[in-house]
Amino acid sequence: MSTSTLPACPRRTALVSSLACLAFGITTAAAQDSYIVGPRALGMGGANVASTDDHTAQFYNPAAFGFFARRTESGERFGVDNNDIGRKRWGFGVDAGASEHIQGDMGEYLDHLEQVDRIRTSGINTQDDVRALLDIAQSLAHVADTGNAISADFNGGAGVRIGPFGLGVRTYFQGTGRVDQTDFTNLGLGTPVTDADIQSGGATGDGTIQVLTPAQQADLGLGLGNAGLNNTSIQVLDLYVRQQGLQNDPQAIQLMVDSLVQSNAGGGNFNNNQTRVIFRGFGVAEVPLTYGMAITDHLSVGGSVKLMLGRVYGTSVRVFDDNAGDVLGNADKNYKQSVNVGLDLGIMARIPMLQVGLIGRNLNSPTFEGPTVTDPTTGITTRFGDVRIDPQATLGVAFIPATTLVLEVDCDLNPAETTLPGYHTQRLGGGIEWNPGHVIALRAGAYKNLAENDVPIVFTGGLGFNLYILRLDLAAAVSPERTQYQGKDIPKEGRVHFGLTVDF
């Protein structure tokens, strides 16, 4: 497994650039997640366990290798060879794909926290700046809540198959960034805030104070000489809190008050804020050796023995550290590497027009050691836990009424862990492939993570172009569930895959 230096990202708030680099910049190699491998499967909603027909069978179901290059003595197709994989004597293929997943409300929180640098530089001068301060307070109050993170994954590989044998190489990577330590003490923006700033443009309150407590009003008012705001300014702040729907969020309101008080008192500056981002990643490179054996024309079994080189990555960085970019530039050097072996076993049964497959991956629970990382600035040492890949089973059922038409549904029978602690994947997916004339394959599908509710459903689609012995496949997936980031609506989950396959 190779490594690469993280690309330079624009210098913005450390949290924003950190997570953006994580999601779109790491190109090493897999987590213990339930992966979607190859563009054919992605186009069909991740469902391929029962109808896999190329080198990705090493991942989806090694039992398919027992049916490759298997025909009658006269060379004819068996009546139960629904997708005609008996015609394939040997071949090879390559594929690669990547995905992003914005979990919880992380996208919106990133948008809000990105405004810290602007306010620290220019101060609060307008009503929009005051509203931005409220957004920052709300985001800081909740960005560390369970389920808020950005994750990205990558997998790619190549494989050669000759009859019932297969040999390949595949790399996987998954990384997650989330805030797991929040500093609610150092909140000052570095510049005082005046009544003129809050009331710029003639802003007035509605004559009432409904949300701010008497203690908060006293902290903001002239009486204690802290923020030094008059009653009109306090009314305006109270109205803004209600307009932005924060009346039931006392922690965010208190953070806003503390920030204004500290800004005017000249203490507790954001430069000293200890809010931290933790990055966790797991990469593995596998070399699977596969064999499939057809017991009868209707039943085949197969397995893969995999040599696995795994790396567990871990990095932490202060959100508002001006040197965060330097720390992130070396993030791919903070890892622990170890070697193990894995075992996959599969079974495939078929009758005319119907195929059923079952795959069990990593049945021996291979484990890889986690690193111990010391922050060179603070001296804080963090021990990242070992990664154990627990066994996972997936069942697939395919209806194949003709060699040009496949409908399949797959379901993971147990949840898989990810690099986001407490977040699991257990996919139910299905799709269709229509290959009229064996020239252009049209694919569509959808999948749902049964273990979590943050993304209700993800839709998939793809194309395959059959050019004699060469096949080019492309696929993408996108969720209709969207989030705000940099003022734009973007999908909370998206995937892309491509592949080239040669069959003889």
Image (spheres, rainbow, N blue to C red):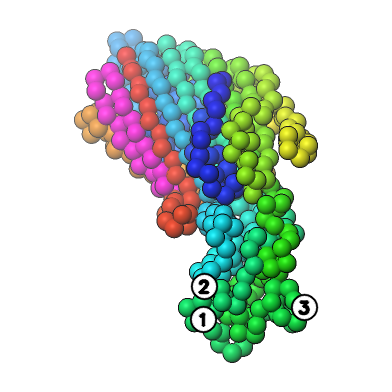
Q: At 62% from the left edge and 52% from the top edge, which residue is drawn?
A: 147
Q: Which mark is residue 123?
A: none
Q: At 48% from the left edge and 51% from the top edge, which residue is drawn?
A: 492
Residue identifier under label 1: 203
Which of labels 3 and 2 is toward the front?
A: 3
Q: Position of residue 30 (x, y in %)?
A: 57, 31
Q: Are marks 3 and 2 in contact (CB under 8 Å)?
A: no
Indicate the secondary structure of the residue bearing disc 2: helix
Query: Magenta segment, which residues?
Result: 458-478
Disc 2 residue type (three-letter): Gln
Disc 1 residue type (three-letter): Ala
Disc 3 residue type (three-letter): Leu
Residue 469 in the magenta stretch? The answer is yes
- Residue at far left of view: 437
Residue 91 in the magenta stretch? The answer is no
Q: CA distance from mark 1 to mark 2?
A: 8 Å
Q: Nearer the viewer, residue 267 or 185?
A: 267
Q: Quadrant of residue 226?
A: bottom right
Q: CA distance from mark 3 to mark 1?
A: 24 Å
Residue identifier under label 2: 127
Which of labels 3 and 1 is toward the front?
A: 3
Q: Position of residue 102 (x, y in %)?
A: 53, 49
Residue identifier under label 3: 224
Neighbor class of circle 2 (other Cα within 10 Å; few <14, some 14-19, many 20+) is many
Q: At 46% from the left edge and 35% from the top edge, which residue is drawn?
A: 98
Label whose residue precedes the other's in the sequence (3 or 1): 1
Judged left or right of residue 343, residue 401 is left
Q: Position of residue 138 (x, y in %)?
A: 62, 64
Q: Is residue 99 visible?
A: yes
Q: Is residue 135 above or below residue 385?
A: below
